[in-house]
Every structure is written in C-alpha cells, then in structure tokens.
C-alpha cells in the first residue's frame, strides 16, 4: 500500500510475532538448561555427602574395632596363649598343683609368695628377705610355697615373665628350683628389657647352678614344657584379687602390703610360732 512520500509500510505483524516467540523459546530453553544444571549439581552434592557420611561411619567403626582390640588385650601377655596340656613341675602342690614347695612339710608356718621374674619389686623383696627365708626353711621352721605370675608381660609386653617361670619350673624338675630362682632374680634385666624371652639367656644362667645345665633342662626350656602351667598360675593370681607382686602371705595373712614388715620381724614371727 502506498503511504506517500517519506513513509514506509510497517513490517508484517506475523514477522514480529515470530521473533517474539523465538525469544520466548530461547529464554525457556535457557531456564531449562539452568534448572538441569542445578539439578545435576544437587545430585552431585548429594552423592558427595553420602560418600562423606559413609567414609565417616567406616572410620568410626574402624576406630571402635581398634579400641576393642586394645581393651581386649589389656593385661594379657603377648596376646597368645600357650598351647598343649598343662604339665605341672615335679613336686608341685596346693590347689591345682600351682605351688612349688620349699622346706619341710611339717613346718608350723607357711609363707606363700606370688612373684614375677621380671618384677623389680619382687627382686627387691628377694634381695632383702631371701637369706632369712632360706635360714628358716633350712631349720625346718618355715615352709615356702612359690607361685609364679606373668603380670609384667601383660603390662610391658613380651614373654620374659612366662619363659623365665617355665625355666624355673624346669629347674624344679631337676631339683634345682631354689638356686635357679635366686640366680634369675640376681640377674634380672631392667623391667623394660625382655631379655628373659631369650631361651639362650635362661640356659646361660642355668650354668651358674651346679648340675642344672643339662640336655633335659635345655629341652624343657626350649620346648616350653610348663608354659600352660605358668599361664594357669597367672590366671589364679589375677582371680585372687591381689594388688600386685610380690604378694607375701604368712599363714594366710598379707604381711608385706603395708611396708611395715622387716626380715627380722618375719624371723621373730616364725620362730615364735615354732615354739
């Protein structure tokens, strides 16, 4: 249609509508892309949170398992129990055959001693009291019952307490318990040094006792003949509710716990009971 000079005809309306619809479609497509991207990000975030939670649960369960293992092994020796039958040493007496007796059966006084060959306090007791104990036992006035424990193995780790106790039981088989018992305490290593876990060391110390270092003794030590018996003795100690080693009982009375006992006082008490 001719509008006259200088005037142009307006573009057809359908062209404007087409452009507008394309713009709207483009905006709608852009919004959909943004929404899709947002949904993907949410999905990734959800998976990441799930992985983090899962990993945290695994860590907590793993830590709980470690704590359980540590708690389960507290107080034990090296975490393994000796296999095989329980073989008591020759002449063992008392309940379950767990006492190694020294002295006359007819003695009027009985001294029960719970000891650990790695225990420094046990060494201190032995060095202070053993001459008096030997004197009273030799005189027929005192019977001594030695019970062996392995608490240092449990507290410090290692197997020296158990292996030394087994070696002492082997010495009992040979009729040499008392002198070998004394040699072990005289040559006790530092509490943190598990030197008695070495059977060669225990056999070497047997050379300090006349007639003990024999093939039979060596086989007994190296084979752990009395290991199960030692562990049974230690379980009896733990079940007894004692506060530690040494535990020293004179006719059933704990005489060493409060620190007031002396060798002279022990000697007087035993001699008075013998009158």
Image (tube, grey):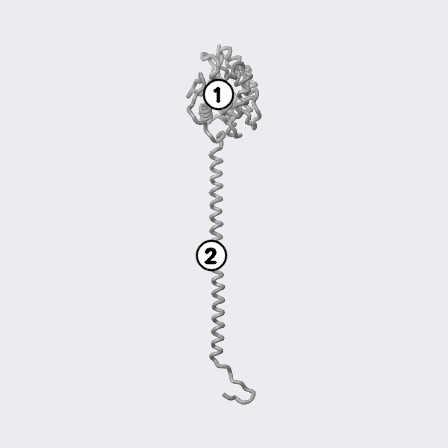
Question: SS class of the residue under badge 2?
Answer: helix
| Of the pair 39 and 98, the residue shown nearer to us | 39
Mark 1 to mark 2 CA distance (whole Å): 70 Å
Residue in the image at 53% along x and 85% along y: 8
* Residue 15 can be seen in this image: yes
Query: Total of numbered circles in the picture?
Result: 2
Q: Dot 1, how many residues are within 10 Å of its Cα: few (below 14), some (14-19), or many (20+)?
A: few
Q: Position of residue 69 (x, y in %)?
A: 47, 36
Residue in the image at 48% along x and 56% along y: 44
Of callouts 1 and 2, the N-terminal one: 2
Q: Dot 2, how many residues are within 10 Å of its Cα: few (below 14), some (14-19), or many (20+)?
A: few
Q: Which quadrant holds residue 106?
A: top left
Q: Position of residue 166 (x, y in %)?
A: 48, 22
Q: Residue furthest bottom?
A: 4
Tell me whether circle 1 and circle 2 mark residues in contact (CB < 8 Å). Answer: no
Q: Position of residue 155 (x, y in %)?
A: 52, 30
Residue where numbered disc 2 is placed:
43
Residue in the image at 54% along x and 14% along y: 210
Question: SS class of the residue under badge 1?
Answer: helix
Q: Position of residue 33 (x, y in %)?
A: 48, 64
Q: Which mark is residue 219?
A: 1
* Residue 111 can be seen in this image: no
Residue in the image at 51% along x and 17% along y: 214
Q: Nearer the viewer, mark 1 or mark 2?
A: 1
| Of the pair 227 and 156, the residue shown nearer to us | 227
> On screen, 122 above or below 3?
above
Q: Which mark is residue 177?
A: none
């Amino acid at each position: 249609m001719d509008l006259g000079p200088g005037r142009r005809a307006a573009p057809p309306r359908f062209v404007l509508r087409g452009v507008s619809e394309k713009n709207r479609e483009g905006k709608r497509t852009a919004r959909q892309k943004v929404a899709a991207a947002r949904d993907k990000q949410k999905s990734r975030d959800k998976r990441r949170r799930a992985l983090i939670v899962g990993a945290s649960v695994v860590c907590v369960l793993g830590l709980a398992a470690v704590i359980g293992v540590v708690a389960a092994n507290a107080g034990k020796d090296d975490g393994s129990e000796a296999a095989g039958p329980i073989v008591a040493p020759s002449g063992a007496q008392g309940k379950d055959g767990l006492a190694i007796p020294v002295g006359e059966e007819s003695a009027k006084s009985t001294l029960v001693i719970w000891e650990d060959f790695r225990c420094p306090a046990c060494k201190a007791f032995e060095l202070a009291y053993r001459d008096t104990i030997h004197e009273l036992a030799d005189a027929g006035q005192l019977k001594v019952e030695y019970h062996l424990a392995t608490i240092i193995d449990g507290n410090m780790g290692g197997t020296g307490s158990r292996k030394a106790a087994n070696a002492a039981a082997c010495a009992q088989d040979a009729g040499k318990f008392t002198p070998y018992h004394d040699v072990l305490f005289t040559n006790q290593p530092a509490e943190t040094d598990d030197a008695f876990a070495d059977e060669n060391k225990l056999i070497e110390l047997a050379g300090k006792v006349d007639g003990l270092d024999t093939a039979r003794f060596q086989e007994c030590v190296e084979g752990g003949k009395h290991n199960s018996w030692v562990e049974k003795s230690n379980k009896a100690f733990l079940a007894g509710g004692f506060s530690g080693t040494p535990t020293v009982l004179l006719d059933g009375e704990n005489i060493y716990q409060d620190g007031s006992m002396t060798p002279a006082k022990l000697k007087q008490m035993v001699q008075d009971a013998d009158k």
